[in-house]
Image (cartoon, rainbow, N blue to C red):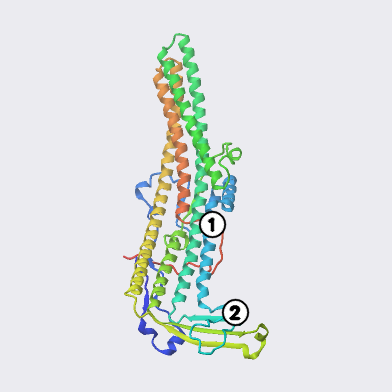
């Protein structure tokens, strides 16, 4: 990556009356960073070592991605409803929106400095001078006078060197950064709701499997007890069967606790009390499964799509503009001041033409001595601009890493799920065979016990893998920056702009 190409307008560039009247702008001219990005995702490259493996059920592709409503690809109406309610009510999102309004209001405060300020006022005073100070010999007693005054005072600092305009550029960038911050909160909210929902359905599925295995183990315990009563087996087999039932029973409360906590988390995300969604979400439903194809686009799309990268770029633009705000203090300030009004010793005299007064004139001020304060402030702003550039570069690298990590996790977890699916089938056959052999007296109970344990473990691992596949897909959508398009914003800048972000082809 390279630093922004910036051009600094030096003090000598503004010399000359004509240029001063036309106004110039000191400070560096901002240009968005040009970022070298890979041409494709490494995780999507073909791997010859995996050619003999079965194709995954869901495949990520570099096709152009439309992520505005990515959660609908799970085809789950309950999830769609939860996300819609979260977007409308989530407190974090409302707080982020309030920060956008704050930034826009601050923009208005800064922009107002471009225009004159006018103060309108009226006053009345009654004066009596001292009769004992500097009074001439033989002077009469001091007299009291009234003075009525009404009018306005105006002042205008002409933005000759562009300090105010640079401030507006910085405030404009702050507004855009706050919009991107809200979008980032929205992206995180969408992913959090989806992840919590997927976790809930996964836990409910694990509870179902645990209860089914518990029922099968109870049947095994009953069979073993009957064989013990018939004198066919010893007490050890009964004790082992009972221990396995108790062990499986112990798994269920922890799973139920996790499911309840997921419902609580979803309720809070929707700005509701923790137990508000219990009735709606407690009935078990199928675990959402990913679509057959997941278009993810190209690495260059991240610059336009990820709000955190867009926010970092806007903060860099604002930091660059603030260098010009600081640099403007090196130059003179030109002002125009004026006043107009009427004043009279009698209130009725304010309407007389003789009561009118006015004044108008230019002014100039230039700080002659500040012991390096201004130049030190410029260095401060330069250092902050360098920090903003480093933060932008880091945000791009972080975005690339997160997408690559999510792609690898999504693809490899599907391979693990396929292997676990085969293991479940094999363990199910083994459990049936072990039980039949035990019933016929051809095998000991330890084989039955081990086979049932293996079946329960593999079935539970398969559900956890299915959960991980869906969770990794949610992570992938989040890392791609999907979802913020559903709620457009307006402001001093068109938020649809990409702020001039440029992706360069990768270097050789």
- How would you rate the neighbour count of disc 2 (Cα within 10 Å): few for under 14, some for 14-19, many for 20 or more? few
The quarter of the picture where the C terminus appears is bottom left
Query: Would you identify the image quadrant in which residue 462 lies?
Result: top left
Residue 434 position (above or below residue 322): above
Residue 460: in sight, yes or no? Answer: yes
- Asked if the residues shown at circle 2 and circle 1 are in contact, with their CB atoms under 8 angstroms apart, the answer is no
Q: Secondary structure at mark 2?
A: strand
Real-space CA distance between mark 2 and mark 1, rounded to the nearest whole angstrom? 71 Å
Front residue (pair 257, 237): 257
Pointer 2 residue: 126
- Which residue is drawn at the image coordinates 39% and 81% (left, top)? 366
Residue 115's disc is: none
Pointer 1 residue: 68
The tag earlier along the polypeptide, 2 or 1, is: 1
Residue 429 position (above or below residue 181): above
Query: Would you identify the image quadrant in which residue 20 lies?
Result: bottom left
The quarter of the picture where the N terminus appears is bottom left
- Which residue is drawn at the image coordinates 40% and 22% (left, top)? 447
- Which residue is drawn at the image coordinates 41% and 41% (left, top)? 416
Give percent across and percent down for residue 458.
Answer: 43, 33
């Amino acid at each position: 990556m390279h630093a922004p190409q910036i051009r600094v307008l030096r003090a000598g560039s503004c010399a000359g009356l004509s240029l001063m009247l036309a106004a110039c702008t000191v400070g560096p001219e901002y240009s968005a960073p040009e970022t070298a990005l890979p041409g494709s995702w490494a995780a999507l490259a073909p791997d010859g070592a995996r050619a003999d493996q079965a194709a995954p059920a869901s495949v990520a592709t570099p096709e152009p991605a439309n992520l505005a409503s990515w959660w609908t690809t799970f085809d789950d109406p309950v999830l769609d409803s939860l996300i819609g309610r979260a977007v409308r009510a989530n407190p974090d999102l409302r707080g982020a929106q309030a920060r956008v309004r704050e930034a826009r209001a601050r923009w208005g405060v800064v922009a107002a400095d471009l225009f004159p300020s006018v103060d309108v006022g009226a006053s009345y005073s009654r004066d009596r001078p001292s009769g004992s100070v500097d009074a001439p010999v033989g002077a009469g007693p001091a007299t009291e006078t009234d003075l009525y005054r009404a009018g306005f005072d105006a002042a205008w600092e002409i933005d000759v060197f562009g300090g105010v305009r640079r401030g507006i550029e910085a405030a404009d960038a702050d507004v855009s950064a706050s919009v991107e911050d809200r979008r980032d909160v929205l992206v995180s909210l969408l992913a959090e709701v989806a992840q919590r929902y997927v976790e809930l359905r996964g836990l409910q599925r694990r509870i179902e499997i645990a209860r089914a295995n518990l029922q099968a183990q109870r049947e095994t315990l009953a069979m073993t007890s009957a064989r013990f009563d018939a004198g066919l087996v010893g007490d050890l087999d009964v004790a082992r069967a009972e221990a396995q039932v108790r062990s499986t029973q112990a798994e269920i409360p922890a799973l139920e606790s996790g499911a309840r906590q997921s419902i609580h988390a979803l309720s809070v995300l929707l700005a509701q009390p923790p137990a508000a969604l219990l009735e709606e979400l407690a009935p078990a439903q199928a675990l959402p499964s990913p679509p057959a194809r997941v278009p993810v686009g190209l690495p260059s799309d991240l610059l336009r799509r990820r709000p955190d990268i867009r926010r970092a770029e806007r903060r860099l633009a604002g930091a660059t503009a603030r260098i010009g705000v600081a640099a403007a203090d090196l130059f003179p300030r030109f002002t125009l001041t004026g006043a107009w009004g009427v004043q009279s010793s009698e209130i009725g005299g304010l309407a007389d033409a003789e009561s009118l007064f006015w004044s108008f004139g230019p002014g100039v001020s230039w700080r002659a001595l500040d012991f390096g304060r201004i130049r030190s402030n410029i260095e401060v702003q330069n250092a902050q601009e360098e920090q903003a550039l480093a933060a932008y570069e880091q945000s791009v690298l972080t975005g690339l890493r997160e997408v690559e990590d999510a792609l690898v996790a999504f693809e490899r977890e599907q391979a693990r799920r396929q292997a676990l699916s085969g293991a479940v089938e094999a363990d199910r056959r083994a459990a049936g065979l072990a039980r039949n052999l035990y019933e016929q007296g051809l095998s000991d109970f330890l084989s039955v016990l081990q086979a049932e344990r293996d079946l329960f473990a593999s079935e539970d691992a398969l559900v956890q893998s299915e959960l991980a596949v869906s969770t990794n897909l949610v992570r992938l959508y989040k890392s791609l920056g999907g979802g913020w398009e559903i709620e457009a914003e307006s402001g001093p800048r068109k938020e649809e702009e990409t702020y001039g972000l440029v992706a360069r082809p990768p270097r050789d």
